[in-house]
Image (cartoon, rainbow, N blue to C red):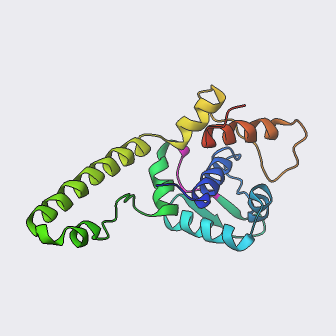
Amino acid sequence: MQLTKGFEQAACIISLLATQDKGVPISSQVINARLGGSQTYLRKIMRKLVVAGLVKSVSGNNGGFTLARDAKDINLLEIVEATEGKIETYPNFGFFDRVFREFKQDTEKATVVINSVFAEADKRWANYLESQTVYQLIAATFDETEIPLINWNEEDISGQRKLIIQKIVENVTGNHK
């Protein structure tokens, strides 16, 4: 299974929101400018994150998006399931039944065995992702116990934003320079 670009974009959005000054929503324009790409696609991702209870939409002149919960309470499994759906790496299209139809009893047993192997693998992967919070990942990225906060809506004079972006991207993608 390979996660889609939607997951990576959602993880970046959650990271932006987790590093945003508390109480100040990030505008959709700022999020779109940071991600690049289609505003329509961004709306779809944001909708998924809102429906999953990970992000809140704030209306008004100074509206935008904030985390719905603390970064300590949001885990990677929730982001994966919000963007990709429930983890199911082996969908069982019935090919074993078709290919080995003369051996119906053995084929049925083989199907049970292979389904259970992949179900257990999915369960283990899900449990591991569930144990990894957004807070842990960002704190580990910065070797800090607190997530550094900035206001993504304002211009960056100090260059702090560039350092934060670089470290978050490296941590999310595993591409360390």
Q: Position of residue 27 (x, y in %)?
A: 75, 62
Residue nearest the viewer, comparing 108 with 6:
108
Number of labels in the image equals 0
Residue nearest the viewer, comparing 126 with 2:
2
For residue 171, side relative to residue 95 (left or right) = right
For residue 166, side relative to residue 17 (left or right) = right
Q: Position of residue 65 (x, y in %)?
A: 66, 61
Residue at the image point whose x is 19% and y is 54% from the top: 113
> Which residue is most to the left?
105
Residue at the image point whose x is 24% and y is 58% from the top: 115
Q: Position of residue 118 (x, y in %)?
A: 30, 53
> Which residue is most to the right?
157
For residue 113, side relative to residue 148 (left or right) = left
Q: Is residue 45 above or below residue 19?
A: below
Quadrant of res 7: bottom right
Per the image, is 69 magenta? Answer: yes
For residue 106, side relative to residue 46 (left or right) = left
Q: Position of residue 157 (x, y in %)?
A: 91, 40
Residue at the image point whose x is 55% and y is 45% from the top: 71
Residue at the image point whose x is 34% and y is 51% from the top: 122
Q: Is residue 74 above or below residue 5?
A: above
> Which residue is most to the top?
143
User: What is the span of residues highlighted in magenta in the rendered image?
Assistant: 66-71
Per the image, is 119 magenta? Answer: no
For the C terminus, the quadrant is top right
Residue nearest the viewer, comparing 94 with 29:
94
Q: Is residue 156 above or below residue 46?
A: above
